[in-house]
Image (tube, rainbow, N blue to C red):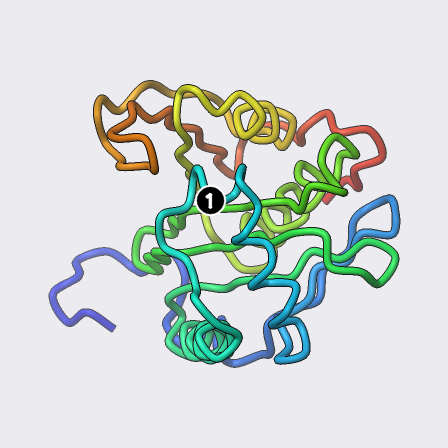
Amino acid sequence: MDPYLSTPPAIPPGSIAAGRQPVLTAPGEVTLRPWEDADAPVFLGAYQDPAIRRWHTRRPASEGDVRQWFEQYRHNWEREAGASWAVTRGGEVAGRVALGNMELADGIAGCAYWVLPAARGTGVAPRALSAVAGWALGAAGFHRLHLSHSTTNDASCRVAVKAGFRLEGTKRSEAVHADGRHDMHLHARIREDSWPAVPGSPVP
């Protein structure tokens, strides 16, 4: 705990790492679970997809790199710095959703996601993001979640809005993608926001 903090932390240090990273569920046979080493081939393959490569300049180059990333994900959970889930549908990996930059003192964290081509347009992404947000803003104790995407990434914008992340503004020239620097939309969802209108979403 920060000895200089004058207010109680929103989330007591140690409370998240005290348990295992949860397995979360969403309608449509969607399950979110921690990554396993056996997922390395499909994870590596995802970063060969042109759409994913367009928005993600940090990429693994081999299955060995992927397994190192998975180990870092486990370490991040232990440090209460982040969490990454494999999004599965019917037992098959369909995408990824993650929390990062966890700040327990203020109760805020960032979100990120991608979906494999076969799962796009099926509602997997907003359902998965909604499931993570429901856990984070509920049992985990966070107060605010935020995410950013290029202003030209309409698909990501739709996912964010469907999962209840309101558009708050534009961050000019914030991020570098494969084709240069992009303005970024900032979305956020706070604990007091109403539950998103994703068909079939559970009520927390």
Residue 4 vertical position relative to residue 70 in the rendered view, above or below: above
Tag 1 residue: 53
Which image quadrant for residue 188? top left
Answer with left or right where residue 37 lies relative to residue 105.
right
Number of dots carrying numbers? 1
Q: Residues within 10 Å of mark 1 (few under 14, many from 20)?
A: some
Residue 192 vertical position relative to residue 56 in the rendered view, above or below: above
Name the residue located 88 percent from the left edge and 57 percent from the top edge. Answer: 90
Residue 31 vertical position relative to residue 65 in the rendered view, above or below: above
Looking at the image, which is closer to me, 6 or 172? Answer: 172
* Three-letter residue code for mark 1: Arg
Answer with left or right where residue 97 lies relative to residue 110.
right
Name the residue located 29 percent from the left edge and 23 percent from the top edge. Answer: 183
Residue 178 vertical position relative to residue 91 in the rendered view, above or below: above
Q: Quadrant of the N terminus?
A: bottom left
Name the residue located 68 percent from the left edge and 66 percent from the top edge. Answer: 33
Looking at the image, which is closer to me, 175 or 188? Answer: 175
In x, y percent, where is residue 59? 41, 58
Give SS at disc 1.
Answer: helix
In x, y percent, where is residue 197? 73, 25
Name the residue located 79 percent from the left edge and 37 percent from the top edge. Answer: 201
In x, y percent, where is residue 17? 48, 77
Answer with left or right where residue 191 lies relative to residue 152.
right
Q: Quadrant of the C terminus?
A: top right
In x, y percent, where is residue 177? 33, 37
Answer with left or right where residue 159 lies relative to residue 70.
right
